[in-house]
């Protein structure tokens, strides 16, 4: 969901950063987050399917009808059936396995039915709840209520659901546990015949009913989390088309959009935004694997939201999205990140919001070019630099503000995704890991360590330090440097402080350095794993300056970069004589002119140790068994001088 701030910092012609993400503001007043099921008895069963048969209107929260829950017992025995429904709603009756229940125990929003005989593990059951009422109305924005009737200018009424994060029980008898995905949902909604109902999955039928009514009959056969089930009721018009995949399959899919039936809607700009959705679906399918609900549809129900809510297969989208497709990309990205693979706990919500936020950048990169991509990323970094502490991984799941922190969950989460991509041996390995994650956990849920394990397998190296520092740790690095050139040798003394040193005293990262000259620049990569390190590299042109992380691949702040001849004494003169050949190589690197007892360490681009030895004068480093790519040789003398050299296989 993007409650979202559409980025505000830099206003450039290439990117529209308009619109303040109200969803974040509304989270500030939300209730404390429920970390488990509302009642322990809810964990005794797994929800298999839901069948809604309810009546709604577009002018109020009035709801009536029934919901049939089909479940399966997962405990050893189940003697009580528990569910959640707002206490202001009247329960007319409950039938359990077709038997009328006479006694229901209610505490707050939790209702419990004592069974005449306990069900055993593996048993299936049906529970049908008949109810009616008018629950409290939301104001049309996030986290205010489950149902939101809004009167727009021009006497236009719309009512839509927003169940995230625990407001589904405002309008239907629910089990609100993110780890219990519902295998299928049938949504029948009866409304006045002047209205349209948008919901999840495919519209199977529209049945005319007496007294100027009609029933919209939607169905989804894909696993879905409770908070992603949705309805939107309004006098909508429909604009739909079929998008086409470019993967050679020849397949196509319905893109179904409902927009306001009022003058001035579906302008050329809005139509262009709707049309672009199919192109973005195809692009993300190439990056992450085929759109996960491609046997059904994707689309939007227009609403007065300040952001968007990623209801599965049909996002409830604010009108501001149609001024900039980056918000469309965010909510569409959620169909993979959050919907197809849901976070296994609220602590791991960055797996949804961080990745969806990065999908905005992936959209910009592909459709607007590299310069716009860099500008967007720098903009995101600019927000986070003001948040010197706090981790991506949620440390307090009772605090709604913390769970949905714009800076930490959204922006820093997106930045971590980019750095995980930057750290990959190749771009293709990063996206291969993302596809593997989707195919492994699709239709279910996953935790941060699940993503880490898959990335490690694809990268072929440990990511312990990266996840420990960037996901679970706090802050970011603050770099400074001194440099001096003598002949073709350049000595660089790289220093690092951090914004939260008690959490992470030093971030271990490969840092790109741009050596500048009038004749042309050169970019090298130094593996930084200490607060102060001295490196020696070669540069044939006369240096005019230096830049740290020139392409903003690392979330960081850079302070001073100065030319300083005094650092020449830091590097042992013996290291100036070290030579490596051949480089590149297929078999081995020969290193000569080493000082006495030189400590030689070879690492890959992630900092993982590949080879280590103590040598005198000359040594041979084997390369035949290594994958093609860039490696780093770090040579340290007894006196503490360090030289870092790039090795190419």
Image (cartoon, rainbow, N blue to C red):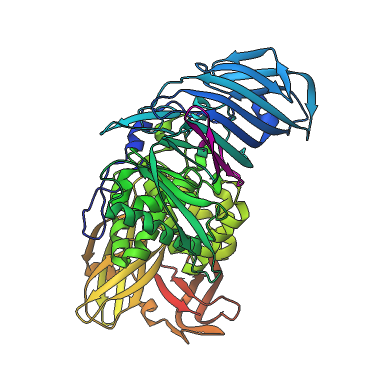
Residue 378 falls left or right of residue 37: left
Residue 16 on the magenta span = no
- Across and down, in percent, residue 191 comes to 47, 31
Which of the 4 image quarters holds residue 30? top left
- Across and down, in percent, residue 456 comes to 57, 60
Residue 453 falls left or right of residue 413: right
Q: Is residue 602 above or below residue 260?
A: below
Residue at (46%, 72%) from the top-left corner?
Answer: 632
Q: Is residue 354 above or below residue 528?
A: above
Residue at (45%, 70%) from the top-left corner?
Answer: 634
Residue 209 on the magenta span = yes
Tell me, yes or no, if residue 634 can be seen here.
yes
Give the magenta range.
205-227
- Across and down, in percent, residue 335 comes to 49, 50
Q: Quadrant of the N terminus?
A: top left
Q: Is residue 431 or residue 589 the one in the foreground?
A: 431
Residue at (52%, 17%) from the top-left corner?
Answer: 87
């Amino acid at each position: 969901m993007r409650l979202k701030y559409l980025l505000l910092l830099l206003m450039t012609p290439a990117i529209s950063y308009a619109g303040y993400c109200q969803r974040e503001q509304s989270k500030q007043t939300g209730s404390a987050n429920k970390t488990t099921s509302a009642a322990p008895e809810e964990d005794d069963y797994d929800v298999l399917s839901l069948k809604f048969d309810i009546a709604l209107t577009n002018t109020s929260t009035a709801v009536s009808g029934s919901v049939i829950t089909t479940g399966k017992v997962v405990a050893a025995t189940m003697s009580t059936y528990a569910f959640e429904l707002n206490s202001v709603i009247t329960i007319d009756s409950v039938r359990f396995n077709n038997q009328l229940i006479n006694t229901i125990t209610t505490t707050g929003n939790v209702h419990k039915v004592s069974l005449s005989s306990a069900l055993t593990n593996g048993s299936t059951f049906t529970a049908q709840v008949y109810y009616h009422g008018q629950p409290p109305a939301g104001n049309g924005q996030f986290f205010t209520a489950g149902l939101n009737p809004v009167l727009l200018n021009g006497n236009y009424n719309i009512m839509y659901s927003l169940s995230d994060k625990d407001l589904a029980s405002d309008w239907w008898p629910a089990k609100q546990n993110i780890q219990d995905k519902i295998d299928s949902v049938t949504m029948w909604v009866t409304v006045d015949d002047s209205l349209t109902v948008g919901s999840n999955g495919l519209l199977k039928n529209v049945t005319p009913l007496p007294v100027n009514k009609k029933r919209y009959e939607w169905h989804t056969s894909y696993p879905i989390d409770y908070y992603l089930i949705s309805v939107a009721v309004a006098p909508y018009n429909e604009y739909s088309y079929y998008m086409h995949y470019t993967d050679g399959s020849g397949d196509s899919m319905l893109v179904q959009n409902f927009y306001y039936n009022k003058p001035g809607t579906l302008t050329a700009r809005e139509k262009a935004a709707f049309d672009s959705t199919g192109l973005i679906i195809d692009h993300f399918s190439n990056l992450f694997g085929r759109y996960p609900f491609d046997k059904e549809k994707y689309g939007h129900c227009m609403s007065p939201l300040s952001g968007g809510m990623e209801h599965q297969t049909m996002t409830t989208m604010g009108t501001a999205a149609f001024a900039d497709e980056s918000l469309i990309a965010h909510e569409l990205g959620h169909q993979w990140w959050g919907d197809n693979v849901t976070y296994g706990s609220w602590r791991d919500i960055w797996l949804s919001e961080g990745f969806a936020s990065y999908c905005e950048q992936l959209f910009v990169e592909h459709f607007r070019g590299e310069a716009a991509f860099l500008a967007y990323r720098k903009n995101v970094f600019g927000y986070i630099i003001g948040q010197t502490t706090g981790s991506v991984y949620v440390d307090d799941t009772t605090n709604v503000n913390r769970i949905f922190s714009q800076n930490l969950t959204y922006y820093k989460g997106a930045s971590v995704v980019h750095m995980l991509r930057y750290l990959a041996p190749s771009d293709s390995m990063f996206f291969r890991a993302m596809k593997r994650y989707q195919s492994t956990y699709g239709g279910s849920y996953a935790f941060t360590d699940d993503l880490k394990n898959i990335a490690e397998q694809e990268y072929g190296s440990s990511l312990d330090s990266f996840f420990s520092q960037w996901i679970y740790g706090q802050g970011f690095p603050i770099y400074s440097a001194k440099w001096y050139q003598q002949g073709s040798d350049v000595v660089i003394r790289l220093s690092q402080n951090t914004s939260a040193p008690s959490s992470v005293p030093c971030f271990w990262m490969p840092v790109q350095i741009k050596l500048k000259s009038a004749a042309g620049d050169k970019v090298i990569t130094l593996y930084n794993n200490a607060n102060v390190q001295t490196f020696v590299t070669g540069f044939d042109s006369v240096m005019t300056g230096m830049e740290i992380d020139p392409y903003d691949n690392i979330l960081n702040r850079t302070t001073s970069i100065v030319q300083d001849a005094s650092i020449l004494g830091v590097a042992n003169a013996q290291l100036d004589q070290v030579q490596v050949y051949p480089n590149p190589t297929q078999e081995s690197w020969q290193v000569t002119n080493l000082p006495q007892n030189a400590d030689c360490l070879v690492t890959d681009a992630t900092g993982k140790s590949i080879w280590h030895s103590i040598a005198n004068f000359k040594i041979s480093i084997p390369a035949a068994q290594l994958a093609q790519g860039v490696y780093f040789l770090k040579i340290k003398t007894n006196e503490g001088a360090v030289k870092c050299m790039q090795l190419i296989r």
